[in-house]
Amino acid sequence: MAEIQVTLPDGSRKSLPAGATGAELARAIGPGLAKAALAIRVNGEVRDLSRALPDGATVSILTDKDPQALDVLRHSSAHVLATAVRQLFPHAKIGFGPPIEDGFYYDFEVPTPFTPEDLEKIEARMREVAAADYPFVREEVDREEAKRRFRDDPLKLERIDDLGPDETISVYTDGPFVDLCRGPHVGSTGRIKHVKLLHAAGAYWRGDERRQMLQRIYGTAWFSKEDLEAYLHRLEEAKKRDHRVLGKQLDLFSIQEDVGPGLIFWHPKGAMLNFQLRRFIEDVILERGYSLVYTPHLTREQLFIRSGHIPLYADNQFPPMSAGEGEAEDVRYRVKPMNCPMHILVYASQQRSYRDLPIRLAEIANVYRNERSGTLHGMLRVRGLSMDDAHVFLREDQIEQEIFHLLDIVDLVLGKTFGLTYRLDLATRPADKLGTDAMWDVAERGLEQALKRRGIPFRLDAGGGAFYGPKIDVKFSDAIGREWQGATIQLDFQLPERFALEYTGADNKPHRPVMIHRAIYGTLERFAGFLIEHFAGAFPLWLSPEQVRVLPIADAQLEAARKTGETLRAAGLRVWVDDRSETLNYKIRDAETHKVPYMAVVGQREADAGTVAVRARGEGKKQVVLPLADFVGKLQDEVRTRALTSLL
Ligand SMILES: [Zn+2]
Ligand SMILES: [Zn+2]
């Protein structure tokens, strides 16, 4: 009998009878592994255990320890969900059902949306499907057979028509349910033990608002009860921190139907947060060789045609508007979706010498992007963005130094000031790019070398770059372990070329500068949204819209309380004296609800002695009596050092 050989992760080889499957390999290695095996990686591709192994392959068996195993489990859970839905709602048409971060979903075409009671019934049925332990059976079929099997599922038929002529069409069956699917899957439905349906929401077929609305059911699945519970707890935490809820409760911002979706109104308290963030970053960069500029929000469309944003970026731009009074009729205007060409025009407005470089132009500017309304989300995904944008024009030999300079700013702002742990991704050329591969080689190598020479670990995000150049993306984690996209540093050889930018070199000849686009916060909207959720609305003192609330115990101390307020205000602190005729307890509760960092209670004893009884946020009833001057000094220190916790 013929044999095949496979290479195991430790480099050893194993001989098996021809036609042996992944499951048989696992059994040959040991009964423990056979039990734990979920799928197998064959030459880097994750496959079902039931498939025959090719001769000469490098293989590794996936158990629940493998990071990719959760995706397989969740994709299989999506099939179990569809199995249950089809049993309970036999006329439901099926769309897509992929794994996603932390879970999975499946889209169904049904006449009415699913109710919470429906979800409970479906989840109960899923448990029955899991208990039945149906094997996931893979078959390869030809196009005709695929169409025959899915003749009652128009969405699947549409999908089959999209498949290329050479694509292998596979179908998976678990018990009564058949799906058009690439796989891979776990061995059987019995593997799915810790699963929970979360909610249902409308979703357009293929994300296209011109197509029909489907009902998407979201769920999550884990390998252990503990993991599932920890995740559900994290979701609860996230709900409590939702910036849309806190934004309303703390009166930070709103979105108004009269004005439109994705456009943020910063209320006085949110505006203070915005102002402090701006002031901080502007101070940081002005100390580091940047210049501020302010540029128009409207431009002749020609500018974005020259930059290449039209047509490459046109889908994200608002449509053009007609020209201003006195201009030719065919001139059209656009609201700007980004600042790059504007800053380029500032650079190009005069002769530049090699000695002037790098030139760093910064602008916290409002730009407008026509994001799909379905993707908008509070402050996190908006149409009006306040970017903390900057463009650096530099010589090629300055790239590495400038990347170091930028990474220092990133570390100062995100790491040292906000106390965030972050990591870096190096994103390289995408399919639809401008410029030659040779240019991209230089740009990608420039970023990679800078990161390596700095000894900073990074991950490669192949194909994730912007159309004009590769980039370093900074991702950071919040208080409950979710990852956010933050700062970005993008190298660009294209725009200087398109705008024929020059500087005079030491050789007295014209040279072309390189350009770096960079943002540290990203946008103020998104970063503020992040901060609200990260701090759960309890901002550090320097960012808090209201820093101290002064509470007189009774009307007799009103005058003393007002004087205390004046002293604090004169010291540069943001204070409100709560002189409402409410009880002290009511006022304390109100200050707690608004997450004010400090309460300064003024009773007769304090009024007479020139002291305040201080309550710090989160410290409950604990009260410290301090001379007013000491209190002021401590708060000033806490603001100046941008401390993340109370210095009291
Ligand atoms: Zn599938
Ligand atoms: Zn730019």
Image (cartoon, rainbow, N blue to C red):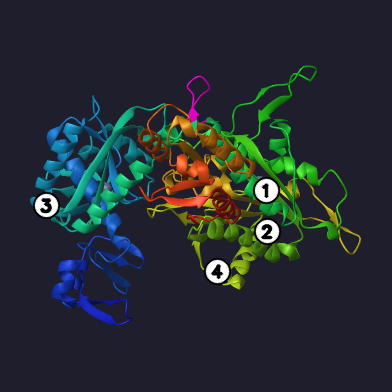
State how far apart marks 2 and 4 are (Cα). Answer: 24 Å
State how far apart marks 2 and 1 are (Cα). Answer: 32 Å
Q: Residue at x 55, y 51 (%)?
A: 635
Q: Which residue, given by chain and number where applicable, does mark 1 sit on? A: 282
Mark 3 or 4, nearer chain start: 3
Q: Main secondary structure of the magenta part?
A: loop
Within 10 angstroms of label 1, few (less than 14), some, or many (20 or more) residues?
A: some
In this view, 113 is above or below 428:
above
Within 10 angstroms of label 4, few (less than 14), some, or many (20 or more) residues?
A: few
Give the label on residue 134, or none: 3
- Whether residue 473 sits left or right of residue 211 in the image: it is right
State how far apart marks 2 and 3 are (Cα). Answer: 54 Å
Foreground label between 2 and 4? 4
Q: Is residue 255 magenta?
A: yes
Amino acid of disc 2: Met
In this view, 549 is above or below 24:
above
The one of 347 and 554 positioned closer to us in this rendering? 554
Q: Which residue, given by chain and number where applicable, does mark 4 sit on? A: 456
Query: Do callouts 2 and 3 mark residues in contact (Cβ within 8 Å)?
Result: no
Mark 2 or 3, nearer chain start: 3
Label 3: which secondary element: loop
